[in-house]
Structure formats: C-alpha cells, structure tokens
C-alpha cells in the first residue's frame, strides 16, 4: 500500500510539472516558427533522421489518414465509383504534399446481436460520421514540425440501445464494441503538436487519450478489433475526449518515454477549462522499446513494440468514481504477414460505499495474432484474440472470451468486417455457460 501511495503522489507531482512544461514550450515554440519554416534551416536529429517521431497510435488522426489514403488491394472494381472519388484522392494527396494539410472523411456502421440475453434487448446498431485532419503549418520537411489537428464527430444509434450498451443485455463483463454510442455533432479533438529534432514532442488541447497511450497496432475500433479489451484496453480507465496534454521523449530511435495528464471527467461534447482547478485528473507514464526487427514506414508506428504503462486516476467526485491506479505490460512484433501480441493489465480501484470502481477489471491477460493477406488480398486481415479477465468485484467469477474479425477490403474506400465474440462464463449471465455476440461493421473512407 505504501508503494501505491508513493506512486500516486509522485505521478501527481509529475503531472503538475508537465502542465507547466508544456505551456512554456508552447510559448517558446511559437516564437521559433519563423525560423522553422525557412527551408534552408538545418536541424540535427540525434534519434535518427530517417525515423520520424510518431506520437499517435493506430486510432490517431494522422495514422488513420495514412491508412485510408494508401493504395488498396481490393475485390470489387466499380469504374463509376472509382472515377468519382479519384479526383478527391488526387486533391487530398496534393494538399498533403504541397501544404501539409491532410483531411479525412469517414462513415462507419455497426450491427451486433447476442445469442442470449438477460435483458429485453438482444441486438444493437449504430453509426458515426467523422471529418478530421491535420495541418503541418510550420517546419514541414524538417525534423521539428508544428501541427494542428481537428476532429468533427457525430454518433447515433438506430436501435433501442446503442451498441456500446449491448453487453449489459448479454450479461458480460465489458462492451463487445466501443465508441458506438450517442454523441451530438461536436468538435471531438482540437490540438497543437510540436516536435523537436524528432527526439522530443508535446501535444496539448482537446485530445482523445485512446489514440496516444498503450500502443497496440490492432487497437482501432474502425478497422480492427472492436471489443473493449483489444480496442480500448478496458483495464485502463482512459477518459473520453477532453482537455489534456502529454510529452514524448525519445533518447534513441528505439526507446521512448511518454507522460500525459488529462481531465478524468472529460465529455466529448464539452470544453471544460477548469480541469486543473478541479484537480480530478487522469495521469499516465509509459516507457517503451522498439526491437527494430523490421524497418518502420515513415509517419507510421513501429513494427514492434514492448512497453509498460503506469496510470493513476483521482477520485472523481463529479461522477462518484473511486481513486484507482494500475499498469499494463504489452508486446507485439510484426513478422511478415503475421502480427502476434501478448498483454497483461492490472487495476486497483479504492472503491468505498457510494463510489463506483474506475474499471470493472482487476486482472487481464490477452494474447492473439493478426494475419494479413490470408486469401492473397493484401488489405484483408484476420484477427484472433483470447482474453482472460478477473472482475474487480469479488462477487463475480472470472470470464474468458475469444474475439475474431475478418476485414474484407471490398473497394478502395469500402471495408466490411464480420465479427464474432465467444464468451465463456459470462459474469452477469450465470444461467449460460457461454454465449456468442456476432456482428458486422461497414466502413466508408471517402
């Protein structure tokens, strides 16, 4: 317990320092923009000039742009549609190359159904519309660029309950899909990012924490796994989109440190500027290593990663949520068409009478593999993951689950993904030894 209290106090001190540090660097960096925009300015790069400092994960705005704009190996050749969107593709490529502006538009629909239910509903459907992008307005083609990011977001559901709530009807421990709920049209993200010599960087503004921490290449509910373990690492109570900041330092091309502070009560539909006055914060520290077994693609996350994430959440009086802390250890390595992974997470929630636990999971063990080009289609992907989880509620038994998905790239801009989740010993559906939640996701990337 003494170690836990020391960790919590230490992280609280770090996050206050981080807030001041980021603010000072924003002021200093804005004063240096003129020099950085000079194409004749040379910058050193101790971490390696050929290795861009990638600050986001698979679900980040920049990474999603790179994925969506890449050339696809697809099944259906529809000349009319391909021609109609080719001009937009050329325009977007030109904006990125000439002006550093990378816009993206997408729409995703999800339907899921459970074979058994403890509630009145056994299915759910929902969708989201996203317009986002990044603009590198200073320091392009240098190792010290300055970038602005934005996201306009709208989500709704077409059933009696949103897909994110279907697990409450099935009686399982955690959601079978994340994100697909109800969000009125809003500015989901708006931030500034600054890098220095591809070695140090910071980002501040309205952020989406899921897109920056506990990197896992299949952690993208729009294109890969959808369940709360693989897509959101549910053992970490990451806040919603809201005010926050983080710094990242890379002493070498294979090692990194990341430290962030966020509003623990964040709401995607609101801008709350009283975060640090209220003092209800979520803090996280990550130490990571890239084995370097495969060369990385510029602008994209590494092909291999081993890291530990240490986090702390204050007691949230706003939502009556207990103080909590925990850690996650994660490792993956892409090897040709195969991407095996293994992860472990632990959470300790100091719940008291009248307070909810920060996360429903105390222990999590997760392992699996993704296989690309299973039937010689380069952009198709099969993902399989096994999860054992122990609830933080001692009254509940352990639960196991197997999640599968197969992403089919129908056209350059349309992907269809059937999903299956086999749940063994669902914790809140004790009449059933197992159940299945099946679904289908359709994504349009314009």
Image (spheres, rainbow, N blue to C red):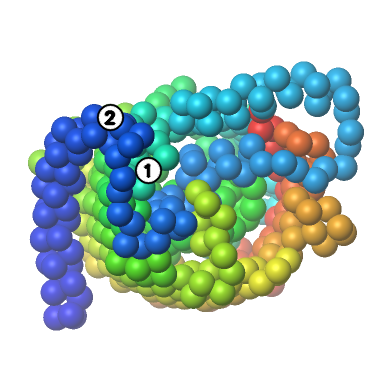
Above-or-below relation of 128 to 285 = above
Q: Position of residue 205 (x, y in %)?
A: 28, 36
Judging by the rendered image, the residue that carries numbered circle 2 is: 271
Where's residue 115, x and y in %?
75, 55
Secondary structure of residue under mark 2: loop
Examine the rendering and report whether any part of residue 318 can be seen: yes
Left or right of 424 on screen, residue 102: left
Q: What residue appears at the point 75 percent right and 51 percent down from the top-left corner?
A: 379
State which quarter of the image contains the C terminus.
top right
**In the displayed image of the protein, which residue is found farthest to the bottom?**
2
Question: Contact, CB < 8 Å: mark 2 with mark 1?
Answer: no
Q: CA distance from mark 2 to mark 1?
A: 33 Å
Please determine whether, in this image, residue 172 is positioned above or below residue 300. Answer: below
The local secondary structure at tag 1 comes to loop
**How far across and down, in percent of the image, does residue 69 sit?**
64, 37
Of tags 2 and 1, which is closer to the observer? 1
Q: Nearer the viewer, residue 298 or 228?
A: 298
Q: Position of residue 412 (x, y in %)?
A: 76, 36
Camera-side residue of 63 and 355:
63
Q: Is the residue 315 above or below the residue 274 in the image?
A: below
Identity of the residue drawn at 41% across and 69% down: 254
Identified at 18% across, 80% down, the residue is 3
Mark found first going from the N terminus, 2 or 1: 1
52 in relation to 182, above or below: below
Q: Residues within 10 Å of mark 1 (few under 14, many from 20)?
A: many
* Nearer to me, 149 or 323: 149
Q: Note whether residue 201 is visible.
A: no
**Label 2 crowd bin: few (<14), some (14–19), many (20+), radius 10 Å:** some
Q: Which mark is residue 276?
A: none
Instruction: List the residue tagged with mark 1.
Output: 142
């Amino acid at each position: 317990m003494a170690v836990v209290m020391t960790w919590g106090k230490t992280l609280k001190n770090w996050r206050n320092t981080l807030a001041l540090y980021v603010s000072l660097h924003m002021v200093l960096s804005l004063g240096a923009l003129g020099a950085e925009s000079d194409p004749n300015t040379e910058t050193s790069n101790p971490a390696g000039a050929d290795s861009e400092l990638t600050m986001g994960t698979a679900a980040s705005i920049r990474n999603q742009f790179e994925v969506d704009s890449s050339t696809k190996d697809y099944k259906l050749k529809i000349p009319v549609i391909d021609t109609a969107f080719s001009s937009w593709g050329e325009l977007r490529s030109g904006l990125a190359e000439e002006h550093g502006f990378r816009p993206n538009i997408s729409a995703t629909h999800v339907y899921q159904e459970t074979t058994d239910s403890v509630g009145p509903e056994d299915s759910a459907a929902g969708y989201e519309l996203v317009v986002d992008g990044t603009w590198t307005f200073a320091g392009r083609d240098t190792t010290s660029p300055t970038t602005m990011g934005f996201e306009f977001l709208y989500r709704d559901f077409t059933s009696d309950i949103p897909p994110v709530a279907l697990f409450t009807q099935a009686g399982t421990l955690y959601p079978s899909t994340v994100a697909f709920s109800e969000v009125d049209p809003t500015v989901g993200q708006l931030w500034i990012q600054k890098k220095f010599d591809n070695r140090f960087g910071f980002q501040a503004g309205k952020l989406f924490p899921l897109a920056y921490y506990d990197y896992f290449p299949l952690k993208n509910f729009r294109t890969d796994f959808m369940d709360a373990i693989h897509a959101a690492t549910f053992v970490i109570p990451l806040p919603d989109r809201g005010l926050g900041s983080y710094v990242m330092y890379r002493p070498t091309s294979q090692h990194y440190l990341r430290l962030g502070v966020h509003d623990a009560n964040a709401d995607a539909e609101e801008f709350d500027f009283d975060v640090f006055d209220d003092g209800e914060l979520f803090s996280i520290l990550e130490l990571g290593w890239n084995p370097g077994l495969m060369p990385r693609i510029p602008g994209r996350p590494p092909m291999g990663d081993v890291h530990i994430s240490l986090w702390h959440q204050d007691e949230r009086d706003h939502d009556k949520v207990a103080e909590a802390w925990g850690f996650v250890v994660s490792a993956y390595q892409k090897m040709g068409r195969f991407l095996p992974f293994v992860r472990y997470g632990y959470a300790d929630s100091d719940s008291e009478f009248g307070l909810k636990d920060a996360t429903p999971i105390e222990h999590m063990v997760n392992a699996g593999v993704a296989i690309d080009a299973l039937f010689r289609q380069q952009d198709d992907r099969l993902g399989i993951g096994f999860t054992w989880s122990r609830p933080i509620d001692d009254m509940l038994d352990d639960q196991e689950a197997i999640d599968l998905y197969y992403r089919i790239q129908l056209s350059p801009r349309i992907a269809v993904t059937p999903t299956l989740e086999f749940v063994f010993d669902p914790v809140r559906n004790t009449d059933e030894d197992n159940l299945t939640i099946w679904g289908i996701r359709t994504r349009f990337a314009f």
